[in-house]
């Protein structure tokens, strides 16, 4: 029997996103993002909190780097705040050197600590200036031009210091959660009990299309103007959990499970790897799903140097009968936690949408690898919340055996996918380095391997998992 392993030069570490950890929303002339605005609207966030302070990471970069070092990590994934770099966001708006240099210094400090930076250009916090000016992602042409300009400013400032770039984090969330479910900024939906504005049947698909074009344009800029001298690679990070049939003997459930993966991953990955949207999406959405022009698809096809994936849990999928309502975004199916036999897909966590199942993660990597011709994968997020964690005394929070179990299972599944199935995976950043602002859930849901005491001055306390992840990778990564 083969012992599962990971390659010698494997990158591993932890991930964060700027709005979730930085705080200091006005520091050094930063502009507002749509999340600065959204989080301050009463009723949008479960505990009424905002990211105004969060983990105070904007003022604690040295502390965060020390923390990373203490875990043994060799990689850190973080995101840049576009509104710190170009406060109003647009291509004719001024660049804010202070905001830009904050991140250049951070990257220098990471290198000095022996940590490879993996940089996300946009993790949901669109400059509010662009939202107000032309509706942000709803205006494909304006948005793509402004994103391209922002990307160029950043590529130029960092040069060869950054070798791993991610254009967007999870376009699925920006589109569906922001323009249909409305739990994320800017909170638009057809559901008039939640918002006066929005069209869930059309806007998410327009937003997704804009994000694809903007991604592809930024990639083209990097390849044409920077790649030869700076030597980095660039891609988009997609999210989605694995999907298994509710009744494995029902071909309609088997088909529905596959369709769910098409509606999450395929929506963005099919155009990049196959040059078109999935047939299942075109069939259900018709002309509500935008068409690529010949010029657009030429730009989008092939626009990934690697496949970035964020995945957490697993689900059982049951097909639905009849025609789907116009706001359906999963492909006319039910997403369930139990199968026909009543078995749970995995244990409960603090997140209603997350039930871990390591076996499903291995299956997901195989599904993606097979469908997209064996690309190189970087897992850019994977982790778990813990049911009731926030209510426990600190000593018990620090002994997060459940999270350790999660990482053992998932990293083991990753090593199995690499060794036994031939999935080409080269890196992994766990979510997250720190407990942080879990968007509309506020601070109650904790994903960190480090406990952050929000009442006690944002002091950091590493949990057991902060060290366990390193021990797990030490076991799998080849030494010679
Ligand atoms: C990711 N879902 O979001 C994000 O990239 C992080 O910023 C976030 O903190 C983390 O996961 C944990 O939630 C997701 O409902 C949020 O399937 C929700 C879903 C998926 C991803």
Image (cartoon, grey):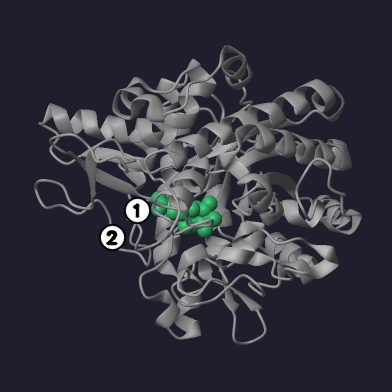
The residue pinned by badge 2 equals 347
Front residue of 121/388: it is: 121
Q: Is residue 422 something that shows in the picture?
A: no
Q: Are marks 2 and 1 in contact (CB under 8 Å)?
A: yes
Residue under the point 66% across and 80% down: 459
Element type at marker 1?
loop
Q: Is residue 271 above or below residue 188?
A: above
Q: Quadrant of the N terminus?
A: top left
Q: Is residue 329 above or below residue 436?
A: above
Residue under the point 35% across and 70% down: 387
Q: Position of residue 474 (x, y in %)?
A: 58, 49
Residue under the point 16% across and 41% down: 246
Alpha carbon of mark 2 to alpha carbon of mark 1: how far? 6 Å
Q: Position of residue 103 (x, y in %)?
A: 81, 54
Element type at marker 2?
loop
The residue pinned by badge 1 equals 356
Q: Taking 184 as reference, is 37 left or right? A: right
Q: Taking 381 as reference, is 164 left or right? A: right
């Amino acid at each position: 029997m083969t012992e599962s392993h990971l390659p010698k030069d494997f990158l591993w570490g932890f991930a964060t996103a700027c709005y979730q950890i930085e705080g200091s929303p006005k520091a050094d002339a930063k502009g507002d993002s749509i999340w600065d605005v959204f989080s301050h609207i009463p009723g949008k966030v479960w505990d009424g909190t905002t990211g105004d302070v969060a983990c105070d990471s904007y003022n604690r970069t040295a502390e965060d780097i020390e923390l990373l070092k203490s875990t043994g990590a060799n990689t850190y994934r973080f995101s840049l705040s576009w509104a710190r770099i170009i406060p109003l966001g647009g291509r004719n708006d001024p660049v804010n050197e202070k905001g830009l240099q904050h991140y250049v210094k951070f990257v220098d400090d990471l290198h000095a600590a022996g940590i490879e930076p993996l940089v996300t250009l946009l993790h949901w916090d669109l400059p509010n200036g662009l939202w107000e000016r032309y509706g942000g992602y709803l205006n494909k042409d304006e948005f793509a031009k402004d994103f391209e300009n922002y990307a160029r400013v950043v590529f130029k400032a960092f040069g060869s210091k950054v070798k791993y770039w991610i254009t967007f984090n999870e376009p699925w969330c920006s589109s569906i959660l922001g323009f249909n479910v409305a739990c994320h900024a800017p909170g638009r939906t057809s559901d008039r009990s939640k918002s006066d504005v929005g069209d869930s049947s059309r806007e998410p698909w327009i937003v997704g299309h804009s994000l694809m074009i903007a991604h592809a344009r930024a990639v083209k800029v990097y390849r044409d103007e920077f790649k030869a001298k700076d030597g980095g690679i660039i891609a988009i990070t997609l999210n989605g959990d694995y999907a298994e049939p509710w009744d494995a003997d029902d071909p309609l459930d088997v088909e529905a499970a596959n369709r769910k993966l098409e509606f999450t991953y395929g929506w963005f990955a099919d155009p990049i790897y196959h040059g078109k949207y999935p047939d299942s999406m075109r069939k259900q959405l018709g002309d509500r799903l935008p068409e690529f022009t010949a010029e657009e698809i030429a730009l989008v096809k092939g626009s990934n140097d690697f496949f970035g994936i964020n995945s957490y849990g697993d689900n059982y999928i049951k097909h639905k009968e009849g025609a789907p309502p116009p706001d359906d975004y999963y492909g006319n199916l039910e997403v369930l936690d139990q199968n026909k036999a009543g078995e749970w897909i995995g244990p409960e966590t603090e997140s209603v949408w997350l039930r871990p199942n390591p076996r499903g993660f291995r299956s997901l990597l195989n599904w993606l690898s097979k469908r997209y011709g064996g690309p190189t994968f970087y897992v850019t997020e994977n982790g778990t919340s813990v049911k009731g964690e926030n209510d426990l005394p600190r000593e018990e929070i620090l002994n997060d055996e459940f999270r350790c179990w999660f990482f053992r299972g998932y990293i083991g599944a990753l090593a199995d996918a690499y060794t036994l199935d031939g999935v080409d995976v080269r890196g992994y950043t766990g979510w997250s380095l720190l407990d942080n602002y879990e968007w509309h859930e506020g601070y109650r849901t904790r994903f960190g391997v480090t406990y952050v005491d929000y009442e006690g001055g944002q002091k950091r306390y590493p949990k057991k998992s902060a060290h366990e992840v390193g021990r797990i990778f030490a076991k799998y990564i080849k030494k010679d």
